[in-house]
Amino acid sequence: MADSSNTSPSAGRVHLSQEGQIAIITLDNPPVNSSNDVVRRGILAALDRIDTQQSHAVVLMGKGPNLMAGADLRELEHEPTEPTLPQVTAAISAFPLPVIAVISGHTLGGGLELALACDSRIATPTALLGLPEVTVGVIPGAGGTQRLPRVVGLPLALDMIVSGKPMTALDAHKIGLVDELLRSSEGDGSDTESFEQVLAYANRYQGGKQPLAERDVPPADEQALNAQVDKLLARARGLPAAPVAAKIVMKAPTLSFSAAIAEERAQFLALRGSESAQALRYLFFAEREKPFEPTQPVKAAPVSRISVVGAGTMGSGIALCALKAGYSVDLLELNDQALEAGVARITQALDEGVKRQRLTQAQRDDALSRLNPTQQLPEVAGTDLVIEAIVEELAIKRSLFADLAQWVSEGTLLASNTSYLDIEQIAEGIPHPERVLGLHFFSPADRMPLMEIVRCNATSEQTLSTAARVAHQLKKRAIVVANSWGFVGNRLYAAYRRQCEFMLEEGASPEHIDAALEAYGFAMGPFKVADMSGLDIAWKMRQQTADTRHLRRYVGIPDLLCEAGRFGRKTGRGYYRYDEATQPTSDPEVAQLVERYREEHAITPNAFSTQEIQQRAELALINEALLLLEEGVCQRPADIDIALVNGYGFPRWRGGPLFIARQMSDRQLESALDTLADVSGKGHQRTHRQAF
């Protein structure tokens, strides 16, 4: 479709054209048609210039893949400028001609609010619709909380707005949010075939004006709604905007439209500048930056085939992740029973995806057709990338790498999934060390979003660029880290766990520490995590470093639990006792064990407040994060926050330890870290704010 000569004067961002009796307003703000003041002015200018006597209806559409992908979040850092989006949606709603929105691509947030202000909505079948504002710390601020319930009812509106989860155009059509689907599954509404369908719909449209402000909210059971809100807020895991969103949506049946819109806007503006909203916006932008930028132009190597060595839980999870991303996958495992079990896990996961309608049967079958289970090492000879996921034993991994180097080409990337071992030692003597790196997945590998790309001394920039591209294909939040103990994530978590053990020794209980940190926003407290992971794993590692215990403060309580056979959930006993449903309950035996330990070490227990527990854990993470920067383990402060949020359950709405540190003055931070050093005792490494 060519632009007419009758173009809006708004820097070419909004175009007005005429097709017979249909006026066409096209948003043209690449790359995603986000809302900004230029676009908003352009829409109003286009509406002003439409000849209402010569036109039957108005079509609002986007050039490129999206109608409007939402607001430009950078605008939220400043005071709103006019015209605001609520002014635009009000103008569309009040316009004398019916306005038809063509929903395409990602029509989210302000984009969907724009569509809701229109009188009818049609969509491409592949479009995605949603109001995800709570995930960036605000609520819909241009009428979404009031218009959506009037279209789909309160239960569905609550689901969409409080969870922030989008839905497909197919589902939106089923619930009446979309009036008609375009027949073509391709195109964005502006290609010739789709555009002809749009014009045909607009020309036959006889619905007239349908302002949602005049429509009643469909009745719903109040008790059921309250129960639904409770469940949604529990799943929101503390997102501060979620309860506000629920409260405003629930007012749709009781307040007048104008009063509810005014309250919605007031709450939106109040949340916009909150620390949680700033933290969520910070992560939004940080997670969208490329994990690696080479110092000079370099082209990532093509990867179409990945070989995973080891068919255990981690290996099969990595293989499943790669299959879902479209790669051909070799799953190499010498033990036939282990290989069979690994394939069964992959098949079961894919079948579950079909059952939950996350995959089609054809997608499931296609994924399995690309899986090559094998016990023969030579079969990986033609692969592009090998990821080893075998036992954490240095000698065994070294032997595997030596064998791999004999079979694969010199251009094949060799990656280890090790959590703690030195990758330089694993690959010592391997030809072409520039292709060696670490790809540290987190369990379960097919679901956890974090990946650490580990850079060794000889790893080339092409290898890192290739790894970054693979990570993107796998839909991972990747960070590039140096080859050092624990990399970034596990080292941070070790410092956090160690501080919690200090507080346990000093007088706090596992239950109080876990409850305090879950109230802080962690998905699970540290002692529940330890029980879930298995206490014997960390015990084995501590035994390997027993000769260095005298150099640092050492808490022996976890060792005593292991000596008593309390290894966590798998044995039914750890810091907690577990029933058949694996629910943790307090165990008096643990309290007695801890009490005896304190008596033997002449420790007088202190009383801890919830705030003290939270502050010490937070400061331990800040201190270790600054040490990681000082030592060059990672180059970008945001990578540390990305790691904790995506791999360890740190609350997104707090931003991360370095985001928190940046909100503190130099004096505040120095004083807090001094206090942490005092209470942490021997072996504590003290850092300084100057690290960033």
Image (cartoon, grey):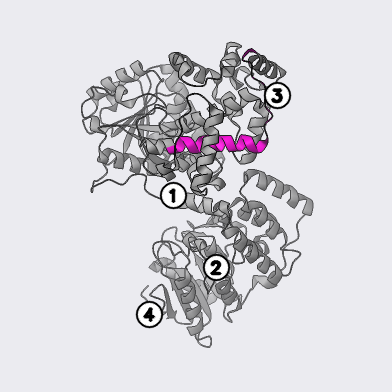
Does residue 337 appear in the picture of this structure? yes
Amino acid carrying mark 4 in the image: Ser
Give the spatial CA distance, label 2 vs label 3.
Answer: 52 Å
Question: Which numbered tag is attached to residue 150?
Answer: none
State the extent of the magenta-drawn residues as a range.
Answer: 600-626
Badge 4 density bin: few <14, some 14–19, many ≥20, Cα 10 Å: few
What residue is shown with label 2?
A: 114
Query: Which quadrant is home to the N terminus?
Result: bottom left
What residue is shown with label 3?
A: 586
Amino acid carrying mark 1 in the image: Ala
**Would you place residue 564 above or below residue 279 in this image?**
above
Q: Is residue 204 found left or right of 633 in the rendered image?
A: right
What residue is shown with label 1?
A: 286
What residue is shown with label 4?
A: 4
N-terminal label among 2 and 1:
2
How far across and how far down the image is residue 526, in percent?
58, 30
**Would you place residue 347 above or below residue 519 in this image?**
above
